[in-house]
Every structure is written in structure tokens, then in C-alpha cells.
Image (tube, grey):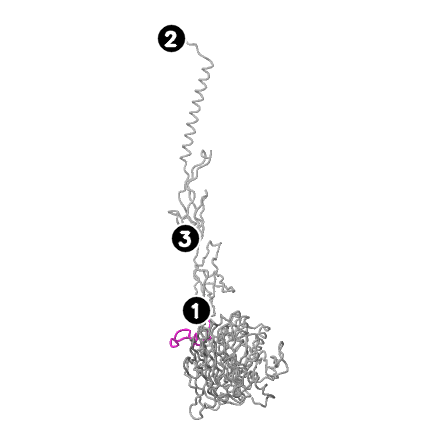
């Protein structure tokens, strides 16, 4: 980038300011990594694979900034192969089929065999090359969109001259047709956006934020129209900003995730860099914050963040001992354009320093004096730095009084978003043999967190990263037409390092989850990844800001065996798992697979009634809440029907009884004839019971070991009948006597007799 490209100093300055305020990441390309390789013996390869993404103009959320772009052993290490043996609800194997993975990167070698299925069709649904003109996609006014037909006909003009995007896509979804290096989700489809441009003689790559956002919307809309769930991988990041989800890009990502998109981002490669400093504010104290800028740097940024309620006076000190109090807007000092401005956000206040010089910035002598004037907030400040240096060294804070330089708070933006899965890196391999037959190795120990993997927390206190995935000596696809690098395995595969390689591992697992559970939310996937992550006591307290929740494990599912007890073999029932219904019997148990980290409700049929057999079965427990691997035993207790029969009524105790319980029953104890029937009918007295087989029961109880029918036995008592007749007979005789006596008396009164004196 020289003065020859511009016509005026004003235009140069404007463009350099745009470049200055961007965030970059070093890409591990051939030139940067070969510098550290020794020809003789076992060579050491330094951490490289970082890239820069440059932001363009912003829309609604504040000033636009730049972003940095960040298998053979790694895929087996995360146990993806084990998951491929599991089948989904439609009988297909879990390999990401029916799910799209969107990638915004340096492009893709769409001719590579690893991006084709066995039937010859391309797994790439579309490519939008934002760097070319001629055929923009719908709703956009720039770029060239390649259809699947163009891709398969090999007429798409897009090329990946860098190889970073090809490598990332291969990790996430490569089919391994060119060799033994299969990606995590080989059945997944791809939607590719090539964005940005090279810098520093091809050792860096820059992207504009507005182009990244366009790419996000393009991928989301393309997947929506095709009826596919989509996971977007962002192997990129920025060190400048609030690190709290407040950036323009992060807010856009939150909206997309709320609409069903899943986003996975690299945690960043600044864990072993001195790019973060922090301290506390005290009224009357001044802090002199210093930094170093490497050679070959034309733009530099420093982002200082405070809480609302904390106010400071900032004074910039230049290498020529010039001091200027902020705010500073586009001032030229010793050939350097300087801005130091204040911006207020919902989450805090940012002071942003921007230094730009087309001739290169001075390396030393820079500092900002921080003087607290109000301390109504937390009194804690944080600062991050970044530059566009083409040097092999990075910008760094210089130790001083009043502040600490730490590896914490180095998680890159947008991995600090509230809706993005942040992925750090650990080592699964540290040696490999290149195409020349040379044995190469790195400094990383297998199983350890990579020293460059960025660390949390976020500025608002959230634990990050979420998980760690393989990020060292990752073998994946390379553009077959690119010139060879000493890192290459062969024509089709190469080795790269960085959290850029970690992120697509997690994106592939997320795609597998969406195949298994198409309605899974971001939270479902995040919880599954966290719950299944592998942990060791050596990592310390879980979670933490180095390891997150642990190392990625694709075994995000667990088996649940559901079986019945207490039912006959010929009896089946239904179980309800979420929204599905399945039949189950004693001799046909069910094996179900569920997603870790989420709860699943299994409900069974409460009662199974077989009326013709006077039997029913009651589930001891109707609803099961499943959270982890277990065996669900649905126990049914049989209940038998007791039929109580009495010819004279008054039955009591008939109904359902649990097996082996004692049923007590009864009927009317005696029945008197009514009215005059007493003269003709006996009294019926309950004298006992018999069961369905005619056996006499000793008492009015029975053990319900099967359905039963009991019948009351009555005896006839004629004693009351006899007594009645005696009473009636006596009454009749008495009545006759009385009548006769009355009649005689009446007769005598009508015919009085003559009474004569008795003779003496």
C-alpha cells in the first residue's frame, strides 16, 4: 500500500485512518511460519495462523472497526467418529446431513475433492465472492454469486489464493475424498462468502465489518430459502472494543441468533500477547500507560473502557515529547495523524486512540496519562491495543506503575457476544511429516491448552471461552492450485494452527446436533457442548476462563433405555417423548437418544384396561424427567376387578384392587318380607359367600391375586312366619270370642228375662 495508489494527501489520510482503526489478525501463511523452521533435524514451528479483518463503515451501532481472522487426529480426538454411527429420526447417520454451515473467510477451493459427495455433487450450495464484480446476489449491489451449477461446472471465477477459508471449511465439513482427513460433519452442506483482501505481501488478510455483516445476512437468507438450519463459523476476531457484546457486529449476530442462526467464533490468538492492561482509578492519582509499536506498522489503535460514572482526563504523550489533552480529532503530529475521542455506549464509555502514518509509526515513546476526576462507577478501567503491523512481532503494552498487563480479558470480539459460542484451542498433535518427508514439530504439548488461545472473562464478567477444541497441527484441505508450502502434507492437505482451526470443529458438532434435533436453539447447543465437554481436575475449578467448560466432545448425546415391568408379553402401551408417540412392550423395549444439557420429558400411558379379563394396569410413575444417561423402568401394577353379587342387593366392595391386596365386601345381612308378605315368605339371612369357582369363603374377605367374583349365600328363617301365624290365629280366636260375647250381650238386652223370687 503506497502513495502511488492515491492522488492526494487527503485521500491517503482518509484511507489510512480507516485502515488504522481496524483490528487485524496474523494469518499463518507460508512466509510467516517458514521463518521459524529449521532445515536440520526436528524443526520448531511457532504459532502463526492469525488473520486480520478490516471493518468498513458502520450503520447503527457506532464506529466501524477491523476484525482479525484467526484432522487426522483432531476429529477422532473429539469422538466425532463415534457419533457418525448414530442414526437420526429418519434413519440417516449423524454427520451433519440436511444442515448448512456458513463460512465467511478467504474463499474456498471449490474444485477440491473434499467438497464433493460420492455421487459427484458439490456440497457447496453457493459462493458469494465479494471481491469480484459482475453478478451480485439478490438484494446486494456488489460481488459475484456462484450457483451450485456453476460450481459443479467449474465456471465459478472465485479462488482462494490464501487457503485459510479452504482449510476452515474442510475441518467443518470435508468429505475426505482426497485422503484420510475427513471433517467433523462430512454430510453438511456449505454456503461460502469470500470477503476482504490481502496485505503485507499476502501475510495478512483484511475484511470490512459491513461486508462481514452483509455476508452474515446472505448466508442466513440463503439457508432460510432452502429450508435449512445453518451454523455460521467465524474464524476471525478483533482485540479492540468493549469485550462485552456491545460491538456493531455482535449486535447483528444477536439478532440472527434470535432468528434461529447458530454462530460459532474463534476465541482469538492473543492469550500470550501483552495486548490487555487494566487498573483502578483514584482521585488525584495519575497513571502513565505505555506501549510499544513494532516496525512496519502504519496504523495503531488503543481502546480504553470505563464504566458510566467514572470520568478521566487523558493526555497523549508522543515520542517527540509533545503532550496533547483529549479530545483530539484528526491532528497531524510529527507526520502522524492522531485522534483520541470519547464514545458512550450502553455498557460503558470508550476512549479510542487512533494513530496513522503511511510512512510507518514510531515504535517507542508513546503513552497516555490517565487522571481520574470522577469515580462513581466501578473505578476499574480496561485497555486493549491492536495494529496492522507487517512485522513478525506484535504491539504490546510496556509494564508500568498503576496498571497490570494480563492474559485475561483477551477473548476476541465477536466471541464475547452474548449469543455466540466461543471456542479456544488445545493441542492434539505436535508433529507431522511434510510432503518433502521432513519431520516437523511444534512446542505444544498434547492435551494442553495452547498458549496463544485467548482467555476470559468478558468485561461484563461472563466466563469465556465456552469450550476448547483442537487448534494445533490441524491437517485439512489446501487449495490444490496454490504453490507448495513446507507445511503441506501433500497436494491436497496442509497443516495450520490457531483458534481459527478450533472454531470449525465446534461448528461441525453444532451441525450434527441440528441434524439430530432440527428445532434445537442456540441455548440447547451451547448446553450440549458444555455438558459433554471433557474435564480434568488439573484444569482447576469448572468452568474457568482458560478451559471454559472443557475440551470439545462430539458425544453430545446420551442413550436412555426404556423398558416395562409388570405387563404381560402380549400387552403393549404408548410412551410419549416430547412430541412423538411410540409403542412399547415387555419384549420390545425402546432405546432413545437425547441431547445432553437439556431435559426431556417421557410420559407413559397411565392406565391400560383389559375389560374382558377384568384386569387393568396402572403405571407407578406417569412422567419421567430425563437429564442424563439412565435406564427408565416403567413399572405397572396390576389391578383386578372384584364383582360382588347378591340376589337381595346391598352389594358393597366391588371395584378395582391392586394385586395381593385384601378386599373386604358385604351385602344386606337380612331381608324382611314387606307387608302381608310376612305371612307367606321367610326372612332371608346372609349366611356366607362363595367365589367364582363355588368355593365357600370363611369370611367376607378375599386376597386379590386375580379377578374374583363372590356371591352372597342366604338362608331362610321361617320362625317369624310361624310366630306370625300363631299371633294371627290367636287374634282371630280372640276376636271371635269377643264377637260372640258381644252378640250374646246384645241379644240379652233386646229380650229381658222375667225374674221371680227364689222360693224360700
State the residue in front, 50 or 135.
50
Residue 111 coordinates in the image, percent (x, y) = 57, 84
- Residue lying furthest left: 760
Pointer 3 local density, CA inside 10 Å: few below 14, some 14–19, many at least 20 = some
State the residue position of label 2.
758
State the residue position of label 3.
704
Between disc 2 and disc 1, the foreground one is: 1
State the residue in front, 649 or 46.
46
Q: Is 318 contained in the magenta span? A: no
* Quadrant occupied by the N terminus: bottom right
Q: Earlier in the sequence, mark 2 or mark 1?
A: 1
**Main structural element of the magenta stretch: helix, strand or loop?**
loop
Q: Is 556 contained in the magenta span? A: yes
Q: Earlier in the sequence, mark 3 or mark 2?
A: 3
State the residue position of label 1.
629
Residue 304 drawn above or below residue 203: above
Residue 109 coordinates in the image, percent (x, y) = 56, 84
Numbered range of the magenta stretch = 535-561
Q: Is residue 558 visible?
A: yes
- Disc 1 on helix, strand or loop? loop
- Disc 2 on helix, strand or loop? loop
- Cα distance in 3D space between marks 2 and 1: 129 Å
Amino acid at each position: 500500500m503506497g502513495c502511488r495508489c492515491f492522488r492526494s494527501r487527503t485521500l491517503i489520510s482518509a484511507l489510512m485512518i480507516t485502515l488504522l482503526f481496524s483490528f487485524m489478525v496474523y494469518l499463518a501463511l507460508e512466509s510467516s511460519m517458514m521463518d521459524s523452521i529449521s532445515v536440520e533435524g526436528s524443526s520448531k514451528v511457532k504459532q502463526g495462523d492469525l488473520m486480520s479483518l478490516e471493518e468498513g463503515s458502520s450503520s447503527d451501532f457506532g464506529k466501524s472497526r477491523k476484525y482479525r481472522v484467526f484432522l487426522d487426529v483432531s476429529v477422532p480426538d473429539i469422538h466425532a467418529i463415534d457419533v457418525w454411527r448414530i442414526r437420526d429420526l429418519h434413519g440417516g447417520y449423524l454427520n451433519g446431513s440436511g444442515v448448512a454451515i456458513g463460512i465467511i473467510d478467504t474463499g474456498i477451493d471449490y474444485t477440491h475433492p473434499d467438497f464433493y459427495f460420492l455421487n459427484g455433487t458439490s456440497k457447496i450450495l453457493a459462493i458469494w465472492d465479494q471481491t469480484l464484480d459482475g453478478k451480485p446476489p439478490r438484494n446486494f449491489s456488489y460481488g459475484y454469486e456462484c450457483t451450485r451449477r456453476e460450481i459443479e461446472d467449474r465456471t465459478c471465477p472465485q479462488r482462494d489464493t490464501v487457503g485459510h477459508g479452504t482449510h476452515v471449511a474442510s475441518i467443518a465439513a470435508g468429505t475426505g475424498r482426497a485422503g484420510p482427513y475427513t471433517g467433523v460433519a462430512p454430510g453438511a452442506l456449505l454456503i461460502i462468502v469470500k470477503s476482504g483482501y490481502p496485505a503485507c505481501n499476502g501475510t495478512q488478510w483484511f475484511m470490512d465489518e459491513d461486508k462481514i455483516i452483509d455476508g452474515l445476512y446472505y448466508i442466513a437468507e440463503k439457508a432460510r430459502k432452502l429450508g435449512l438450519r445453518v451454523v455460521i463459523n467465524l474464524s476471525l476476531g478483533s482485540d479492540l472494543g468493549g469485550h462485552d457484546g456491545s460491538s456493531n457486529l455482535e449486535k447483528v449476530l444477536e439478532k440472527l441468533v434470535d432468528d434461529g442462526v447458530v454462530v460459532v467464533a474463534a476465541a482469538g490468538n492473543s492469550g500470550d500477547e501483552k495486548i490487555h492492561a487494566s487498573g483502578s482509578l483514584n482521585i488525584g492519582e495519575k497513571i502513565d500507560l505505555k506501549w510499544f509499536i513494532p516496525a512496519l506498522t502504519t496504523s495503531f489503535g488503543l481502546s480504553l473502557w470505563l464504566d458510566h460514572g467514572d470520568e478521566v482526563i487523558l493526555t497523549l504523550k508522543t515520542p517527540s515529547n509533545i503532550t496533547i489533552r483529549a479530545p483530539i480529532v484528526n491532528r497531524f503530529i510529527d507526520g502522524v495523524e492522531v485522534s483520541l475521542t470519547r464514545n458512550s455506549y450502553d455498557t460503558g464509555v470508550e476512549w479510542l486512540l487512533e494513530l496513522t502514518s503511511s510512512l510507518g509509526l514510531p515504535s517507542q515513546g508513546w503513552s497516555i496519562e490517565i487522571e481520574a476526576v470522577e469515580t462513581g462507577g466501578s473505578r476499574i478501567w480496561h485497555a486493549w491495543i491492536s495494529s496492522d503491523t507487517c512485522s513478525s512481532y506484535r504491539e504490546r503494552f510496556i509494564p508500568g506503575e498503576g496498571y497490570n498487563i494480563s492474559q485475561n480479558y483477551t477473548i476476541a470480539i465477536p466471541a464475547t457476544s452474548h449469543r455466540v459460542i466461543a471456542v479456544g484451542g488445545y493441542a492434539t498433535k505436535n508433529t507431522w511429516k511434510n510432503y518433502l518427508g521432513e519431520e516437523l514439530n511444534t512446542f505444544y504439548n498434547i492435551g494442553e491448552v495452547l498458549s496463544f488461545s485467548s482467555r476470559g472473562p468478558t468485561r461484563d464478567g461472563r466466563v469465556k471461552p465456552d469450550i476448547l477444541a483442537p487448534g494445533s497441527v490441524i491437517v485439512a484441505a489446501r487449495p490444490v492450485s496454490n504453490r507448495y508450502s513446507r507445511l503441506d502434507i501433500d497436494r491436497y492437505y496442509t497443516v495450520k494452527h490457531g483458534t481459527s482451526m478450533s472454531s470449525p470443529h465446534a461448528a461441525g458438532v453444532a451441525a450434527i446436533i441440528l441434524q439430530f434435533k432440527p428445532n434445537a436453539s442456540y441455548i440447547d447447543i451451547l448446553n450440549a457442548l458444555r455438558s459433554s465437554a471433557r474435564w480434568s481436575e488439573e484444569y482447576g475449578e469448572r468452568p474457568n476462563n482458560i478451559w471454559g467448560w472443557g475440551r470439545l466432545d462430539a458425544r453430545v448425546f446420551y442413550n436412555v433405555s426404556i423398558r416395562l415391568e409388570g405387563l404381560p408379553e402380549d400387552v403393549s402401551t404408548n410412551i410419549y417423548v416430547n412430541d412423538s408417540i411410540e409403542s412399547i412392550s415387555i419384549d420390545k423395549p425402546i432405546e432413545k437418544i437425547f441431547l445432553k444439557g437439556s431435559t426431556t420429558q417421557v410420559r407413559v400411558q397411565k392406565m391400560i384396561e383389559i375389560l374382558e379379563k377384568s384386569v387393568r394396569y396402572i403405571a407407578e410413575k406417569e412422567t419421567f424427567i430425563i437429564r442424563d444417561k439412565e435406564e427408565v423402568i416403567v413399572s405397572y401394577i396390576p389391578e383386578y376387578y372384584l364383582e360382588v353379587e347378591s340376589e337381595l342387593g346391598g352389594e358393597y366392595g366391588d371395584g378395582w384392587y391392586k394385586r395381593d391386596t385384601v378386599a373386604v365386601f358385604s351385602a344386606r345381612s337380612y331381608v324382611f318380607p314387606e307387608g302381608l308378605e310376612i305371612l307367606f315368605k321367610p326372612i332371608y339371612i346372609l349366611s356366607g359367600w362363595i367365589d367364582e369357582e363355588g368355593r365357600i369363603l370363611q369370611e367376607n374377605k378375599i386376597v386379590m391375586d386375580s379377578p374374583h367374583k363372590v356371591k352372597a349365600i342366604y338362608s331362610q328363617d321361617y320362625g317369624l312366619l310361624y310366630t306370625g301365624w300363631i299371633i294371627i290365629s290367636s287374634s282371630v280366636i280372640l276376636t271371635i270370642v269377643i264377637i260372640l260375647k258381644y252378640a250374646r250381650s246384645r241379644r240379652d238386652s233386646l229380650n229381658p228375662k222375667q225374674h221371680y223370687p227364689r222360693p224360700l
